[in-house]
């Protein structure tokens, strides 16, 4: 049977076609998002001036974003980075990274299920107080754990990386297409658990093909240093190419 019910429409088309949104609501959402787009453009200029290569990490809650950052902190001294963390509440993730010697600032969003460009601008001001950007090459943004809302908010990042952990199941690509269409790379995390969850990597590639996405796919396990190094090398290479994501949010 054919898969049904997923589409690769633009944000504008999705909003206009949503039967649950009135015309007025569509206009309000579009206004908020276009203000965000303008701020994201300003952020790009800031990143360029500060010499920061920026990676936006997105995934469901608990798929291993902070663990990946902890592993990167331990993986190579030459890989110099700082982190903006996004969560609804608590500064637990920032504390985990600070404990590994990484400058990290926690943005607590309250009820908001995503980070927006304005929050990043404010977070950068605070992060700059504890971190000399001149000594840093990469800024990681750990977005709020959510496979939906962060896909609508441009943060001006050079690379958008989406994690999908094996316990979540191998059927998520077509269920949450807008998130996976953002991705410049997809990372299947908790790869060490793959066999226990009957997770089929082939399903991920097939579903990405259905989205016409040819992004690289990485297998990652916090228990496998080589898998962390492979992802680190990919980010380093993209930075050397000064790759800028082409995705239009
Ligand atoms: N087996 C296994 N467990 C992992 C791996 N990566 C992370 N975990 C575990 O998964 C749980 C959640 O990991 P986090 O790194 O906190 O996940 P997160 O995506 O940062 O979560 P939020 O910030 O809440 O969205 C922790 O108990 C980790 O120890 C992995 O590669 N293998
Ligand atoms: Mg986290």
Image (tube, rainbow, N blue to C red):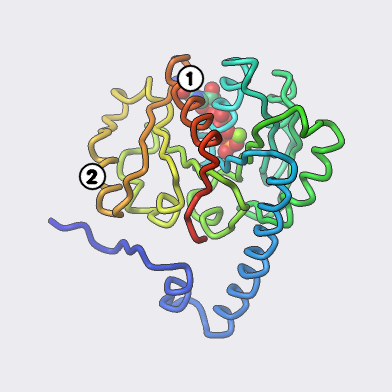
Locate residue 159 relative to residue 207 in the image: left or right.
right
Other residues around mark 2 within 10 Å, as few (<14) / some (14–19) / many (≥20) = few
Quadrant containing the N terminus is bottom left
* Label 2: which secondary element: helix
Q: Residue at x 71, y 58 (%)?
A: 42
Task: Indicate the position of residue 107 as horizontal and vertical percent values.
Answer: 74, 44
* Label 1: which secondary element: helix
Task: Indicate the position of residue 165 as horizontal and vertical percent values.
Answer: 42, 33
| The residue positioned farthest toward the front in the image shown | 241
Measured in 3D between alpha carbons, the distance from the residue under mark 2 to the one under mark 1, in whole angstroms, is 26 Å
Task: Indicate the position of residue 248 as horizontal and vertical percent values.
Answer: 50, 61
Q: Residue at x 74, y 35 (%)?
A: 91
Q: How many marks?
A: 2
| Above or below 95: residue 145 | below
Depth order, front residue of 27/88: 27
Looking at the rendered structure, which numbered label has been put on residue 229?
A: 1
| Above or below 65: residue 211 | below
Q: Residue at x 73, y 49 (%)?
A: 46
Q: Would the CB of label 1 be found within 8 Å of ligand 1?
A: no
Q: Which quadrant of the structure image shows residue 187?
A: top left
- In this rendering, which labeled residue sits more in front, label 2 or label 1? 1
Depth order, front residue of 190/104: 104
Locate residue 244 relative to residue 136 in the image: left or right.
left
Question: Can you identify the residue that label 2 sits on?
Answer: 206
Q: Residue at x 48, y 49 (%)?
A: 147
């Amino acid at each position: 049977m054919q898969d049904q019910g997923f589409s690769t429409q633009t944000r504008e088309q999705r909003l206009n076609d949503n039967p649950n949104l009135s015309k007025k609501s569509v206009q309000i959402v579009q206004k908020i998002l276009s203000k965000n787009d303008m701020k994201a453009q300003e952020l790009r200029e800031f990143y360029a001036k500060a010499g920061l290569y920026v990676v936006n990490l997105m995934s469901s809650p608990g798929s291993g974003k902070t663990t990946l950052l902890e592993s990167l902190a331990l993986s190579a001294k030459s890989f110099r980075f700082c982190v903006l963390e996004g969560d609804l509440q608590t500064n637990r993730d920032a504390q985990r990274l600070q404990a590994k010697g990484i400058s990290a600032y926690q943005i607590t969003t309250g009820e908001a299920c995503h980070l927006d460009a304005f929050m990043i601008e404010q977070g950068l001001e605070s992060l700059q107080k504890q971190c000399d950007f001149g000594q840093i090459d990469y800024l990681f943004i750990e977005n709020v754990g959510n496979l939906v809302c962060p896909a609508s908010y441009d943060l001006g990042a050079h690379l958008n990386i989406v994690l999908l952990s094996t316990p979540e199941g191998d059927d998520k690509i077509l269920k949450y297409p807008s998130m996976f269409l953002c991705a410049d790379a997809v990372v299947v995390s908790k790869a060490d658990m793959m066999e226990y969850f009957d997770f089929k990597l082939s399903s991920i590639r097939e579903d990405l093909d259905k989205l016409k996405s040819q992004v690289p796919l990485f297998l990652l396990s916090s228990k496998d240093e080589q898998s962390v190094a492979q992802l680190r090398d990919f980010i380093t290479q993209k930075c050397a190419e000064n790759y800028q994501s082409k995705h239009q949010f």
